[in-house]
Amino acid sequence: MAKDPSFDIVSQVELNEVDNAISQALKEINNRFDLKDSKTTIERSDKDITIHSSDDFSLKQVLDILELRLTKREVPLKAFAYGKVESSLGGRVKQVITARVGIDQDQAKKITKLIKDSKLKVSAQIQGDTVRITGKKRDDLQAVMQLIREAEFDFNTQFVNYRG
C-alpha cells in the first residue's frame, strides 16, 4: 500500500551563502572611504554573526551592506534575530545577529493552527523542529504550500522532503 503524499515545513539558513555574503560585505567595507577607518570586523561562529565597529553610525552602515549582500545571495532576512547594540571599550560597538534554524514549538503551533483553520483535508504533525504535512491529494498539499507562502510569519519557512 502506497503512503499518502507528504512534505515537511522547515526553517533553514544556507550558512555557506552567509559566509559568502560576509566576505563580499567585508570587501565593500574595506573599499568604502567612509568606512575605511572604522576598523570594522564581521565574524561568523556557528549560527552567530558578530559585527564590531567604531560607532553606531558605522555599525548601521555595515548592517545595511551585509543585509544587501544576504538578500542578493537569496538568504532571507527573516531568518535572523538581531541582538541589541552593545558598547565596548574605546567607544566601539558590537552587535550579534543569530541565524534562526529550526521551527520552535510556538512557531509550529502557529503553522498547525493556520492549516487547521483553513479546513483543508490534511494533517499537520510537529516533529521536533519541523512540521510534517500529510494528505490524500497532492492538490491539498500544494494549497497548504500556497497558504504558508502567503502567511506573514516573522520567521523563515521552506518546504522539503516532498513525497508524492
Image (cartoon, rainbow, N blue to C red):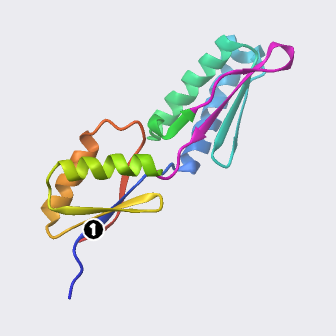
- Residue 11 seen anywhere in this rendered image of the structure: no
How many numbered badges does the structure rendering display?
1
Residue 164, by quadrant, is: bottom left
* Helix, strand or loop status at disc 1: strand
Residue 18, by quadrant, is: top right
Q: Is residue 126 left or right of residue 140?
A: right
Q: Quick one: which residue is furthest to the right in this view?
A: 90
Q: Is residue 132 left or right of residue 26?
A: left
Residue 126 higher or lower than 64, as above or below: below
Which residue is label 1 attached to? Answer: 6
Q: Which residue sits at x=14%, y=61%?
A: 121
Residue 115 drawn at (x, y percent): 23, 51
Residue 129 drawn at (x, y percent): 47, 58
Residue 78 higher or lower than 53, as above or below: below
- Residue 100 seen anywhere in this rendered image of the structure: yes
Name the image quarter holding the N terminus: bottom left
Q: Which residue sits at x=86%, y=19%?
A: 89
Q: Residues within 10 Å of mark 1 (few under 14, many from 20)?
A: many
Residue 154 drawn at (x, y percent): 40, 36
Say which amino acid is labelled 1: Ser
Q: Is residue 29 left or right of residue 13?
A: right
93 in magenta:
yes
Residue 92 drawn at (x, y percent): 79, 17
Q: Quick one: which residue is furthest to the bottom in this view?
A: 1
70 in magenta:
no
| Residues in magenta, as a range | 82-103
